């Protein structure tokens, strides 16, 4: 189920265990409501064989359709990332996928009994904590790798995402809001420098108070609340304190990592995003996959 351009290699004697694919030692469950649907849902994340990838299973639908977390199944990207398989969809997958890929979980079955992954506290921290408690089981096939050998960029107006060659994965994100409490923020993270679970996963989703009613009229953020999202108005944060001074920028970086996991693995590149969106994240991932496949 690997995306085109992501290659696995035979395991040779002396292969470092960190280079092997991994799954969970045991499964775990989470319950909550979807950010956009507002529907209560239960998720079970379970071990899976090597070469499976990360696969969602809609257990509430007839035949329990499987939806692989790959670019081939990327659907709508309005304020979240959706995956599709035929008529089956699952939405807001990015936080869970970010926690899985940064925790080293290459293969997992993700059973969900509704149309959207629960938001929990608005961050990836509950997922990362549960994954760590479940434990990592290394398998017998080499982990996929993806190397970006030349710069790739996608852009809409002054918003862009680009990937440039680097010796290891690094992600840098900038945002710029007219609301003074957010303003211009940046954050950069690499797995060789700091643990995702400590420095990025706790960052929560955020929104602007004056946009809430308009979004709800569009059928969005039906499950959003002050318990699972940071809300900012023109005077400042409605529900402080923040977990980091630049928590919004860190959360956007979290989303980027989750969206790029649809490549099958995180690319060996420095990915730089500015004022971007799930749509631009997905377009960059597709451009990377296409560039690797044809290069």
Image: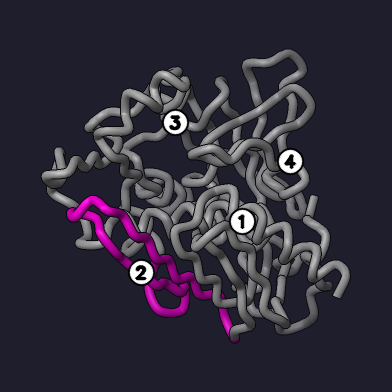
Which residue, given by chain and number where applicable, does mark 4 sit on? 73
Q: Which one is earlier in the sequence, the residue at label 4 or at label 2? A: 4
Q: Is residue 234 above or below residue 264?
A: above
The image position of residue 255, as x and y in percent, is 47, 52
Q: Residue at x 50, y 75 (%)?
A: 170
Q: Are marks 3 and 4 in contact (CB under 8 Å)?
A: no
The image position of residue 115, as x and y in percent, is 57, 23
Q: Are marks 1 and 3 in contact (CB under 8 Å)?
A: no
Q: Are marks 1 and 2 in contact (CB under 8 Å)?
A: no
Q: Could you tell me how far apart the alpha carbons at marks 4 and 2 are, in whole angstroms?
A: 29 Å
Q: Which one is earlier in the sequence, the residue at label 3 or at label 4? A: 4
Span colored in magenta: 167-195
Q: Residue at x 45, y 26 (%)?
A: 220
User: Helix, strand or loop at disc 3?
Assistant: loop
Residue at the right extreme?
294
Image disc number at residue 118: 3
Q: Could you tell me how far apart the alpha carbons at marks 3 and 4 are, in whole angstroms?
A: 20 Å
In the foreground, 99 or 179: 179
Which residue, given by chain and number where applicable, does mark 1 sit on? 261
The image position of residue 83, as x and y in percent, is 66, 37
* Magenta stretch: includes residue 192: yes
In the foreground, 21 or 164: 164
Image disc number at residue 187: 2
Q: Which one is earlier in the sequence, the residue at label 1 or at label 4? A: 4
User: Helix, strand or loop at disc 2?
Assistant: strand
């Amino acid at each position: 189920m690997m995306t085109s351009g992501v290659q696995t290699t035979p395991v040779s004697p002396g292969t470092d265990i960190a280079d092997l694919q991994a799954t969970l030692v045991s499964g775990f469950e989470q319950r909550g409501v979807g950010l956009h649907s507002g529907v209560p849902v239960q998720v079970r994340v379970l071990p899976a064989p090597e070469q499976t990838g990360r696969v969602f299973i809609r257990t509430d639908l007839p035949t329990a359709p499987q939806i692989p977390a790959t670019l081939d199944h990327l659907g709508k990207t309005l304020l979240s990332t959706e995956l599709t398989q035929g008529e089956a969809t699952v939405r807001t997958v990015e936080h869970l996928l970010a926690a899985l890929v940064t925790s080293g979980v290459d293969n997992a079955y993700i059973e969900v009994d509704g149309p959207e992954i629960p938001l929990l506290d608005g961050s990836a921290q509950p997922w990362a904590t549960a994954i760590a408690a479940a434990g990592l089981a290394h398998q017998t096939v080499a982990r996929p790798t993806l190397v970006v050998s030349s710069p790739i960029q996608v852009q809409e107006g002054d918003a862009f995402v680009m990937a440039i060659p680097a010796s290891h994965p690094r992600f840098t994100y900038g945002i710029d809001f007219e609301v003074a409490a957010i303003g211009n923020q940046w954050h950069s993270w690499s797995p060789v420098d700091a643990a995702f679970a400590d420095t990025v996963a706790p960052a929560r989703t955020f929104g602007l108070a004056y946009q809430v009613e308009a979004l709800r009229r569009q059928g969005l953020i039906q499950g959003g609340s002050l318990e699972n999202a940071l809300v900012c108005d023109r005077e400042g944060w409605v529900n402080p304190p923040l977990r980091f001074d630049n928590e919004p920028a860190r959360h956007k970086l979290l989303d980027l990592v989750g969206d790029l996991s649809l490549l099958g693995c995180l690319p060996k590149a420095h990915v730089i995003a500015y004022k971007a969106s799930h749509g631009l994240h997905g377009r960059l991932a597709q451009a990377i996959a296409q560039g690797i496949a044809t290069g």
